[in-house]
Image: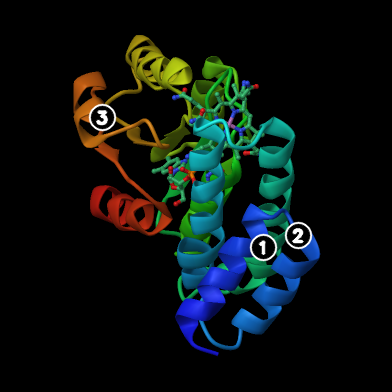
Amino acid sequence: MAKDELFKELSDAVVSCRKDDVIAAVKKGMTQASAVDLIDNGLAMGMNEVGILFERGKLFLPHVMMAADAMTAGVELLQDELSAGTGAGQKLGVIVNGTVEGDVHDIGKAIVSTMLQASGFEVHDIGRDVPLQNFIDKAREVNADMIGLSALMTTTLQGQKEVIELLKENGMIDSVKVMVGGAPATDAWAKKIGADCYAENASEAVAKAKEFLL
Ligand code: B12
């Protein structure tokens, strides 16, 4: 099967919320493409399409939830391959990653955590809808080199800025790097709030973490 067809099959299965089809397509795809490819070009494409249809009012929230559930099932199947990446076992640096308070979106953040871990970073994923002070407390507890902040809504983006302010108040801004991400975040936003870097997707997050921590 051509890769394009495979990616389309994965994407279509997410859009139509068919968990069984997602699982079958991922199993088939694992022999033909890397886990990162299957996620970026297949599953995430389907999720993006769901987002566009949701924005246009063509489908409603329960559909988005079911599609997210189907996508998560696919990502979980690929977890082992992601964690078995070349860097696993090394320790390139310690990263605390989470989705800021008020925001429950965590699919993309989880992919970023897995990829960072697979590349050799020690990752403490503290979940979603995380109270902002928890980022500071966790970073201190594990002696983090970097904090990753995910926000998927324009309303919660502000939380990224507030964590940076908390780092300043706690005298930690010079010892902990901050990487921001999520659909509404941009390079310009990262600069504006004083974050060290922004990454558009999981592969870029790994590249930026290496750039800033190694
Ligand atoms: C799936 C989804 C949901 C699911 C989330 C399930 C889950 N467990 O995550 C559910 C159904 C629960 C949901 C709920 C809501 N959602 Co919603 N949701 C989406 C949707 C369709 C897809 C998000 C997604 O998973 N994409 C796939 C992943 C792989 O991509 P990603 O998240 O962007 O992550 C990548 C990058 O951004 C980056 N990245 C992500 N995190 C990080 C972190 C770091 C450190 C770095 C470096 C990079 C990085 O790397 C990732 C991998 O490549 C988006 C639409 C969209 N286009 O984004 C709307 C969207 C985000 N949701 C939206 C809204 C409004 C809501 C609700 C308020 C709806 C409601 N009326 O109740 C609630 C929010 C509740 C809350 N308090 O948080 C809006 C936000 C609008 C805005 N601009 O603020 C969007 C944009 C849809 C829309 N256009 O209206 N949603």
Q: Position of residue 177 (x, y in %)?
A: 32, 35
For badge 2, the amino acid type reads: Arg
Task: Name the front one of labels 2 and 3.
Answer: 2
Label number found at residue 13 = 1
C-alpha span from label 2 to label 3: 37 Å
Q: Which is more toward the observer, 205 or 1?
A: 1
Closer mark to the observer between disc 1 and disc 3: 1
Residue at the front extreme?
A: 58
Q: Residue at x 66, y 73 (%)?
A: 26
Mark 1 vs mark 3, CA separation in Å? 34 Å
Farthest residue to the top: give it: 169
Q: How packed is label 1: few (under 14 Cα within 10 Å), some, or many (20 or more)?
A: many
Vertical position of residue 37 compared to residue 124: above or below: below
Q: Which x, y percent locates residue 4? A: 46, 78
Identify which residue is drawn at 59% across, 34% down.
105
Give the mark, 1 or 3, whose residue is nearer the N terminus. 1
Figure check: 73 above or below 47: below
Q: Nearer the viewer, residue 60 or 30?
A: 60
Q: Which residue is mark 3?
A: 190
The mark that comes first in sequence, 2 or 1, is 1
Query: Could you tell me residue 43's position as x and y percent?
Result: 56, 60
At mark 2, the secondary structure is loop
- Residue 173 drawn at (x, y percent): 30, 23
Name the quarter showing ligand 1.
Answer: top right
Residue beneath disc 2: 18
Q: CB under 8 Å between callouts 2 and 3?
A: no
